[in-house]
Each structure stands twice: as structure tokens, then as C-alpha cells.
Image (cartoon, helix red, strand yellow):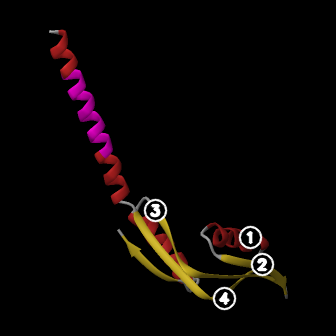
Amino acid sequence: MFAKRMNWMLALAVAVCASVAMAADASAAEREIVSFRLPQWKSAHFDDAKSAQANFETFKQIGCEAEQHQHGGHFDVRFRCVQWRSIALTSHDEAHQWERWLKAYGFETSHRH
């Protein structure tokens, strides 16, 4: 009796582990990937330091080269990303938001599921 119960518990444990592993594979497969590049330097102008700094930091976080300058009453952020880079996102909507943001700044993009 004890052996049957242990076999049943072992089978249950294996089934749970298998379903967790399949769920992890499914969630990895369902990730949204946005790839991007911008080989030539581009500049964006900002009226306030806070917006300039936020965009500068975002460009750096996603792997771009970026510089920040202030002149003529506004702030410039200069950036480029010579090599293709990718970011993995958890939802389709989030991927489209990033893709729109990147395209607004002149990046080439590729979005795959």
C-alpha cells in the first residue's frame, strides 16, 4: 500500500514539474521581441531638462550611444545604435508602444512574436 501511494505521489510530482516546465516554455515562446537599429547619429530637442534626461537614460538603457547637450534655451540628446539590438517584452501592446517610440526617433524596427 505504501509503495503504491509513493508511486502515485511521484507520478503527481512529475506531472506538476512537467506542467510548470511547459508553462515556462510557453511564456518564453509568447514573449514579444522588438529589434531596432539606427546607424547614423540623430538628435532630439527638448525644452526641459527632465524630458531630455529621461530620454537620454532610456537610450543608454536599451544599448544606444547617447550624448546630452544644452544650448540656445533647449536640450539636445544625440543618439545612435549601429548594431541591431533587441528587447523582449511581455505583451503585444507593450511591444507596439516601444515600436512606435523607436520609430518616432528614426529607428528601423522589427517586431516578432
Question: How many neighbours does mark 4 have within 10 angstroms: few (below 14), some (14-19), or many (20 or more)?
Answer: few
- Where does label 1 land, which residue? 53
**Which of the two discs, 4 and 2, labels the residue nearer the N terminus?**
4
Q: Quadrant of residue 51?
A: bottom right
**Which of the two discs, 3 and 2, labels the residue nearer the N terminus?**
2
Identify which residue, 48 or 7, lies in the foreground.
7
Q: Are marks 1 and 2 in contact (CB under 8 Å)?
A: yes
Q: Amino acid at mark 1?
A: Gln
Q: Is residue 1 left or right of residue 37?
A: left
State whether residue 107 is above or below residue 10. below
Q: Quadrant of residue 42?
A: bottom right
- Where does label 3 land, which residue? 89
Q: Amino acid at mark 4?
A: Trp
Residue stretch rendered in magenta on the structure: 8-21
> Of helix, strand and loop, which one carries label 2?
strand
Q: Residue 100: x percent and y percent?
A: 49, 77
> Of helix, strand and loop, which one carries label 1?
helix
